[in-house]
Amino acid sequence: KVVQISRSEIERVDKYVSKKERDSRLALPVIFDSPPLVVTKLGKSLLQFLKKINHGRKEASYYQKLILQILNFLFEPELIAGKIEEATILGTERRDIIFINDSEKTFFSYLRNVHKNFVIVFETKNTYDLTVENFNQLGTYLGDKTGYCGFLITRNNISKKDKLKAISIYNNLKRIILILSDQDIELMINDRIIGKDPMRYLQKCYREFMVSIQ
């Protein structure tokens, strides 16, 4: 049946091949519990790809897919079954990246127990600046079904305005939005390369945010 379709509807094959060729530059293995040399090589490759992706809508999908691979590299097997653009059953909401929180480590299990994060949502924004809509969008995704802590990943360093917006959302909705920049991602990748647990970096970001709202 597959052969028959591929012969009669050759445009489907062409579209599939074209898509795979476009995405080939992000075709890296995602592995954990690997020898240090393999971890180092993969980490450096991910850093190179991150620096090559341009800001803006045109390469937003590449950025999103790369961030998924980076998150796998950093947090497997604590966060598992990562998916891009996981839609709700009615299709009314579509989240950039969502993971199942299967961790027994202190911070991720803390998010699950305290903030109901049985899943963890990551929104990616391949932009120079974050907008109010970016924060509101992630804020609407968070709640009883997804947990009350989510991550907003963007290209540039976080501004004071961004921090104040995240604090405002917490004060009004009790939803925690932690912002990560390319610089934060690079630091966590380098931690992973040298054998440090990047989860600790997320824990530090969480602690700094909670202190800032008091």
Image (spheres, rainbow, N blue to C red):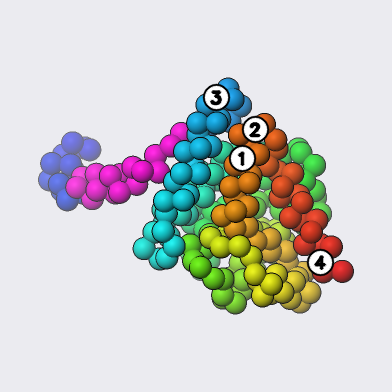
Q: CA distance from mark 4 to mark 3?
A: 39 Å
Image check: 14 left or right of 210? Answer: left
The residue to which callout 3 is attached is 37
Q: Secondary structure at mark 4?
A: helix
Q: Residue furthest right?
A: 214
Name the mark on residue 128: none
Crowd tier of the residue under label 2, counting other residues whose Cα lies within 10 Å: few below 14, some 14–19, many 20 or above: few
Name the mark on residue 212: 4
Across and down, in percent, residue 203 comes to 76, 49
Marks 2 & 1, CB-CB < 8 Å contact: yes
Q: Quadrant of the N terminus?
A: top left
Q: Secondary structure at mark 3?
A: helix
The residue to which callout 1 is attached is 190
Question: Callout 4, which amino acid?
Answer: Ser
SS assignment for the magenta stretch, majority? helix
Q: CA distance from mark 4 to mark 2?
A: 30 Å
Q: Is residue 91 magenta?
A: no
Question: Which residue does the image show at 71% across and 50% down from the upper left?
Answer: 202
Against 30, residue 37 (above or below) is: above
> Is residue 94 visible to us here?
no
* Residue nearest the observer in this picture, 42 or 141: 42
Q: Residue furthest left?
A: 8
First in sequence: mark 2 or mark 3?
3
Q: Quadrant of the C terminus?
A: bottom right
* Residue nearest the observer in this picture, 167 or 44: 44
Question: Which residue does the image show at 61% across and 62% down from the upper left?
Answer: 157
Image check: 176 left or right of 95? Answer: right
Q: Secondary structure at mark 1?
A: helix
The residue to which callout 2 is attached is 194
Quadrant in the rendering for residue 75: top right
Q: Is residue 15 magenta?
A: yes
Range of the magenta residues? 13-29
